[in-house]
Image (cartoon, grey):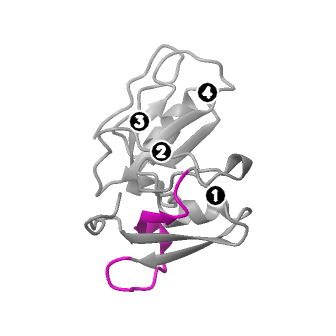
Amino acid sequence: MKAPVTTAGGVPYVVGLDLQKARDAVWMSGYHFIKPHDALGRGRTQLMLSNWQVCDQNPGPGKIDKETTVKLGVVRKDEDCPSVPLPTEKPTAPDGVMPYLIGRSVNVVREALRDDVHVDADDLKSGRPIIVENHWKVCTQDPPAGAPLPDDKIRVGAVKFEEQCPAGKAG
């Protein structure tokens, strides 16, 4: 069992801990603004904190202002941490320009763009219904990134995260 590495009066190093222990260690060190996020960019909510492990933290260990939010990137315990940071910020459509959506979770895309446009999502493999949207990643988008955002709807083609996008499709 890993224990947090403490720093004299600062934020402890909590990478590798389960989220419950990490939150407790950060809280007990006097930092009460703690924000976990899905390190795989899938937009999943962490309900059972002990089922998630910390992959990265920002800021790292050390003394910082107590009002600083400590961000913890987490994955489920049965998942590997990403080798490179994945985008976790929601895509936006500033000035009516279509953002790059490839590789993002369908639920993140729908939630991020819900005020701008309707999102139609289709399974690219076999026409399966997309019910649990955070299990699906975007492989195609219409219109493409950089194009004007339409007034009515956009289309995304998706596969489950553990699947490869079909040949000739990005993601």
Can you identify the residue that label 1 sits on? 112
Amino acid type of the residue that numbered disc 1 sits on in the rendered structure: Ala
- Secondary element type, mark 3: strand
State if disc 1 and disc 4 touch (CB < 8 Å).
Answer: no
| The C terminus sits in image quarter | bottom left
Q: Quadrant of residue 127?
A: bottom left
Where residue 30 appears, as percent x and y from the top left, is 61, 27
Which residue is drawn at the image coordinates 41% and 27% (left, top)? 13
Which mark, residue 30? 4
Disc on the earlier residue, 2 or 3: 3
Where residue 154 appears, as percent x and y from the top left, is 59, 69
| Camera-side residue of 97 and 104 | 97
Can you identify the residue that label 2 sits on? 87
Where 18 sits versus 45, above or below?
A: above
Q: Nearer the viewer, mark 2 or mark 3?
A: 2
- Secondary element type, mark 4: loop
Disc on the earlier residue, 2 or 1: 2
Which residue is drawn at the image coordinates 32% and 79% (left, top)? 125
Q: CA distance from mark 4 to mark 1?
A: 32 Å
Amino acid type of the residue that numbered disc 4 sits on in the rendered structure: Gly
